[in-house]
Structure formats: C-alpha cells, structure tokens
Amino acid sequence: MNTAETPFDFVTASYLTRIGNQSAGTLAELLTGLEHCSDASIFHHTFQTLGTHHFLTEGFSNDFAQWVLASTNRNDLAEQLTALDIRDYMSIAALRSDLCRVVRDFCDAEPQFAAQSGLERFYFCESVEVTVPLGRSTRNLDEFREGLEHLSHASFYFHFISSRLRLQLQTNDFSLWLSGSLGLRTLADSVNQIDIYTNTLDSARTKMLRLIDRERRKA
C-alpha cells in the first residue's frame, strides 16, 4: 500500500455570508454586476448554492436564475441561466463570461425588459470561510477511507465543493491528494467526476467510499 510523504489533513469550515457593495434591481444592472463582481461572488451564487440547498435535484440551480424568475418573472431567461451546467466549466472566468453572454443577449433581444424594475433587489454576496483543523492526518488509502467515513457534512463540503474555488474548478482536495500524493490518478479522476448536481453530500460520500473500496481490492 502506498504511503504518502505529505499527509492529508482533514479540516472543517463554517461560512459567513458577506453582502457586497453591488446590487441589481433590473436585468441591465444584473449584467453590470456580473461583469464586475468578484470571482468569489460568482462561485457563491453558483457552486455554493448547491451547499445551501443541499444539492438541488430539480428547479433552478443558481441564485441568478432564481432571482430572475422570482423578481422579474422572466422564466425564459431563468431557464437559459440554469441551463449553464457548472460541471462543464474549468474556470470562474469562463463561467462569468457565459453568464454575462446569456443576460446580455436577452437584454439586447428584449430591451423593453432590460430596465424593468424587479420586485426585490439582487445583492451580490461572498462566503467568508472560517476553517478549523480537525487534528487528523492520513498517509495511506486505508486511513483516508476511515477518516472520510466519519467526516461531518461541513468538512466534506469544504474538501469536495468549496475547495474548487481555491483550485480554480480543476479538481477537489480529495482528488488532488489521491493523485499527487498516492499516485492514484484513475481513482482521483473518478472521485472528481462524482456529480455534484444530482448527489447529496451523503450520497457523494457513499460513492466515493465505494470507489475507494474498489481500489483497495486491487491491492
């Protein structure tokens, strides 16, 4: 069994929502906000929405689409925004570009709706992350599996979802360590491909444990 020189240190985290100085009351203002808000804000309203709603399996999957429907009653634009599958993106910049494109195209095609005031304003927010080390380190796959099995939802979310902002959407903490420290690239890729849209935190963890067990049987 491979032993890593660099251990995996489990961490837990809590999140405080910080409201920024940007807001939107119209679709035109939403476009301006999307163009100029921070990467952390884009991540908050798309990827971290999954955590807030414990992974949506139906309905609109990001805050932008939710606001467009609820406050401006533009179901057509909301559907276009939610059709942007965050699983397809490898950078925040690319996701931002497509969000802007969809809203811009709609405003250009339907100028009568671009300046129409919504029922409520949209406030661009970020998640402020507060981390606490759990004091548990693992150096091989068996130890990693045991630690993973007993992780809290908060810790699992930190390593599997929130880490994607730090890692520029390329991967997650688990896959990064499995590949880089244990050399288990196939396992790492399989873990990274677990669908963050259609799985809950519990079902994502269960799938990950099954993948690890299959890898252990190879040894």
Image (cartoon, rainbow, N blue to C red):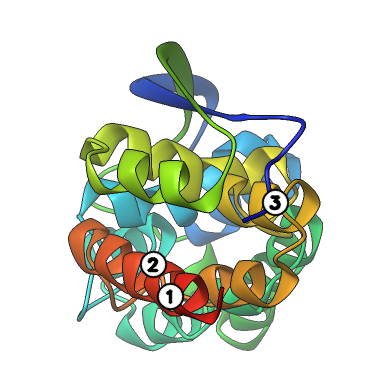
Mark 1 to mark 2 CA distance (whole Å)? 5 Å
Pointers 2 and 3 in contact (C-beta within 8 Å) = no
* Quarter of image, res 179: bottom right
Between 32 and 131, the residue placed more toward the observer is 131
The residue tagged 1 is 211
Q: Position of residue 25 (x, y in %)?
A: 42, 45
The secondary structure type at the circle numbered 2 is helix
Q: Position of residue 194 (x, y in %)?
A: 45, 75
The residue located at (68%, 52%) in the rendering is: 2
**Residue 118 seen in the current view:** yes
User: Which quadrant, please, contains the N terminus?
Assistant: bottom right
Q: Is residue 82 left or right of residue 110?
A: left
Q: Nearer the viewer, residue 207 or 101?
A: 207
Q: Residues within 10 Å of mark 3 (few under 14, many from 20)?
A: many
- The residue under the point 44% across, 36% down is 158
**Vertical order, 209 against 81 (above or below):** above
Pick the quarter of the image with the C terminus: bottom right
Q: Earlier in the sequence, mark 2 or mark 3?
A: 3
In the rendered structure, which amino acid carries the disc numbered 2? Met
Considering the numbered disc 1 on the image, is that residue within a helix, a strand or a loop? helix
Tell me whether the residue at label 1 lies in contact with that at label 2, contact meaning CB atoms closer than 8 angstroms.
Answer: yes
Is residue 68 placed above or below 74 in the rendered structure? Answer: above
Alpha-carbon span between mark 1 and mark 3: 15 Å
Q: Crowdedness of circle 1 by 10 Å Cα count: few (<14), some, many (20+)?
A: some
Disc 1 residue type (three-letter) = Leu
Q: Position of residue 198 (x, y in %)?
A: 29, 78
Compared across the picture, whether 51 is left or right of 90 comes to left
**Which residue bears the numbered disc 2?**
208
User: Residue at left 51%, top 60%?
Assistant: 27
Q: Which three-letter amino acid code belongs to the residue tagged 3?
A: Leu
Q: Nearer the viewer, residue 49 or 8?
A: 8
Give the labeled residue for mark 3: 176
